[in-house]
Amino acid sequence: MKRISDVTVFVLSLCFLIIVMSCEGPTGPAGADGIDGNANVKTETFRVYSHEWGSDYPFYGVDKSSNILSKDIIDNGAALLYWEIGDGMWMALPLSTVYYGVAENIVSVVTESSSLTQSTQIFKLVAIQGYQLAKSADIDFSNYDEVRTYFNLD
């Protein structure tokens, strides 16, 4: 008798699970749309204060640490640097007297202009992972507004 009740409990439990798992309720409400973005593109804005510029006449330079310049960005991506020349106006580097270089976790800015080193300068670094995808885009990388719009940056 014990064997029959064990088998009965097992069969009833199995039937109950099948019924519960096959039940389907109404579809729930749609969630709110999230903010569009691009996880493969990051930006970082930094300031260079007048006392930070080192001098090796006729050049002045500064190295700044960066959390967005990974080895993958350096090896397979792109790093673009823009210099704020006015309120919200960005100029793509390099220029004839201002240039930059990047290494893992470091961006270096070099200038021949001593006047640039006399006041605080603001730069914006854009790191693009998988640059091959962006190469085919119809975008002027020297125009920060186009880059910002294309990659949906702040």
Image (spheres, rainbow, N blue to C red):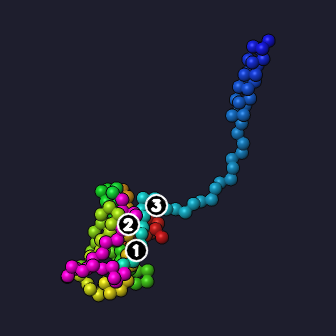
CB of mark 2 within 8 Å of CB of mark 3? no
Q: Position of residue 9 (x, y in %)?
A: 76, 22
Q: Is residue 153 covered in magenta? A: no
Q: Where is mark 2, residue-wise?
A: 66
Disc 1 to disc 2: CB gap under 8 Å = yes
Q: Position of residue 84 (x, y in %)?
A: 38, 79
The tag earlier along the polypeptide, 2 or 3, is 3
Amino acid on which disc 3 is placed: Asn
Look at 38% across and 66% down and name the residue there.
66
Residue 30 position in % (x across, y down): 65, 54
Q: CA distance from mark 1 to mark 2?
A: 9 Å
Please tell me whether residue 110 is drawn above or below residue 129 in the rendered image. Answer: below
Q: Is residue 14 at least partly visible in the picture?
A: yes
Q: Which of the labelled discs sits on residue 46, or is there none?
A: 1
Residue placed most toward the observer, 83 or 118: 118
Residue 133 screen position, x and y as percent: 36, 57
Measure the C-alpha gap from mark 2 to mark 3.
19 Å
- Above or below for 5 versus 115: above
The segment highlighted magenta reads 49-70
Residue at the farthest right position = 1
Circle 1 SS class: strand
Question: Which dot, 3 or 1, sits closer to the camera?
Answer: 1
Disc on the earlier residue, 1 or 2: 1
Asked which secondary structure carries label 3, the reply is loop
The residue lying at 37 percent from left, 81 percent from top is: 49
Return the mark for residue 38. Answer: 3
Question: Residue 2's mark?
Answer: none
Residue drawn at (32%, 87%), measured in percent from left and top? 118
